[in-house]
Image: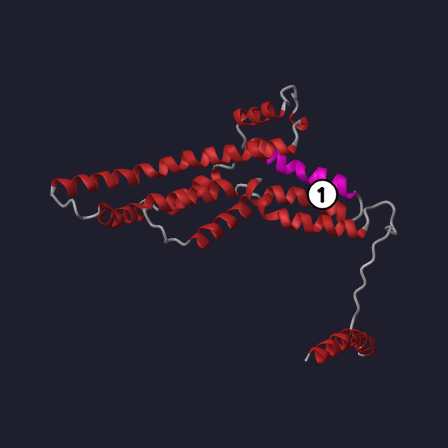
Amino acid sequence: MRGSQSRWRGVLPGLLIAGILLLGSAGSAYGIPQINVEVGDADDSSGLPLTLKIVLLLTVLSLAPAFAILVTSFTRIVVVLSFLKHAIGQQQTPPNQILTGMALFLTVFIMAPVWQEVHRSALEPLMNGEIQEGEAWEKAIDPVREFMFHHTREKDLQLFMGIAGAKDVSRREDIPTYLVIPAFVVSELTTAFQIGFLLFIPFLIIDMVVASILMSMGMMMLPPVMISMPFKILLFVLVDGWYLIIQSLVTSFA
């Protein structure tokens, strides 16, 4: 038994090497494309090496979801919609996928002028070979920075500038982007919570009225949520709630 095991141990590496050689010869015979990865100097000395460009592209694609969430209107919209669902008292309706999709498409609609400016000033010249990657990045980030500055509270911006020791910076152009992004996110969360508080008030009044009526009738064992839920939905439908909320969210970025 041990002799057969040692015999197979000697045969298996040979079979593996022979199989690789056969696959290589069969691939060349049947025209199967071969992939060769080489690392070397770029032919074009004026730009970045191709391998480095691929690494940068993969890095940008991996950070794209976080970038799309934190430097756009997505944060405010999705937080407000989440507040609305909890204010009504529905934990499953509408589903989170629908709210996230709505927030995503509203973000595309609101950020369309910014993306058009990025395409016009950065992406199109880069594709035409008029500018290099570094200049294209600077031109692409400028419209996004202007959007963030417009919706960032001065108090939040001063907070992160003070933490980073950049209090002496007077011009907006000299403020680093890594300080603008967290200040913008904090401002968006603050605004979203303010809107969410205003959304809770009418539904909270309905809950208090229903709970008071049930207690006065001695029906303490009946959950007030079961009675107030239809009235909340009715109030939301009568005032055309979706129209008002979407209108308020979109116009808040004007």
Q: Residues within 10 Å of mark 1 (few under 14, many from 20)?
A: many
Image quadrant occupied by the N terminus: bottom right
* In this picture, residue 91 sits left or right of residue 124: left
Assess whether residue 144 is covered by the magenta stretch. yes
Q: Which residues are magenta?
A: 132-147
Q: Which residue is mark 1?
A: 122
* Amino acid type at mark 1: Ala
Tell me which residue sits at (64%, 45%) in the image: 116
Total labels drawn: 1
Residue 104 in picture, x, y percent from top left: 52, 49
Q: Main secondary structure of the magenta part?
A: helix
Assess whether residue 110 is covered by the magenta stretch. no
Residue 123 in picture, x, y percent from top left: 71, 46
The furthest residue to the front: 2
The answer to whether residue 71 is above or below residue 166 is below
The answer to whether residue 195 is above or below residue 31 is above
User: What colour scheme does the image use?
Assistant: secondary structure
Q: Is residue 112 visible?
A: no
Q: Is residue 134 visible?
A: yes
Instruction: Please state which of residues 103 and 59 is positioned toward the viewer in this rendering.
Output: 59
* In this picture, residue 19 sits left or right of residue 233: right
